[in-house]
Image (tube, helix red, strand yellow):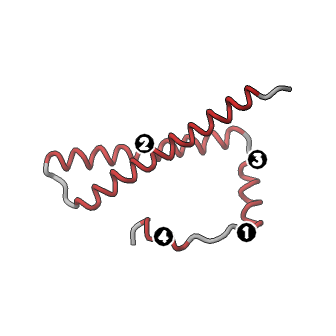
Amino acid sequence: MSEFGKINGISGTSTAQLLKQKSKVEGGSEAFAEHLKSALNEVNEFQEKSEKAIGDMATGQVKDLHQAALAIGKAETSMKLMLEIRNKALNAYKELGRTQL
């Protein structure tokens, strides 16, 4: 089953799970920086797989067109998400700059 088939398995988050996540987040900016770095590396991996799939399609070496299309779609979606997160973070930073103390 593909990753996309797992959407039906989403369940609510309990208070205990949220408290566990909170304790992990309270590690400070280092934990946030590591999480951000991990997310950027994942987006980069998707982009590299997409480029390889496009190259394989261009040279006729593609074995499974469906898998190549999925790789390209994942890369596109992850890049859009990362750009949206960046935009939200920049807007929050600008809003903090406008806040009067």
Precedes in sequence: disc 3 or disc 1: 1
Residue 47 screen position, x and y as percent: 37, 44
Precedes in sequence: disc 2 or disc 1: 1
Residue labelled with disc 2: 44
Give the residue drawn at x 45%, y 48%: 78
For disc 3, the neighbor class at 10 Å (few under 14, some 14 to 19, many from 20) is few
**How far apart in space, not on screen, are marks 2 and 1 (Cα)?**
32 Å
Residue labelled with disc 4: 6
| Amino acid type, label 4 | Lys
Work out whether residue 69 or residue 100 is closer to the camera in this orientation and state it: 100
**How far apart in space, not on screen, are marks 2 and 3 (Cα)?**
27 Å
Residue 70 in the image: above or below residue 36: below
Residue labelled with disc 1: 14
**How far apart in space, not on screen, are marks 4 and 1 (Cα)?**
20 Å
Camera-nearest label, 4 or 3: 4
**How far apart in space, not on screen, are marks 4 and 2 (Cα)?**
23 Å
Residue 46 screen position, x and y as percent: 39, 48
Give the residue drawn at x 72%, y 64%: 17
Precedes in sequence: disc 4 or disc 2: 4
Residue that extends furthest to the right in the rendered view of this protein: 101
User: Is there a contact, CB below 8 Å, between mark 2 and mark 3?
Assistant: no
| Amino acid type, label 2 | Asn
User: Is there a contact, CB below 8 Å, between mark 3 and mark 1?
Assistant: no
Mark number, residue 26:
3
| Amino acid type, label 3 | Glu
Precedes in sequence: disc 4 or disc 3: 4
For disc 1, the neighbor class at 10 Å (few under 14, some 14 to 19, many from 20) is few
What is the tally of numbered marks visible in this picture?
A: 4
Quadrant of the image occupied by residue 71: bottom left
Quadrant that contains the N terminus: bottom left
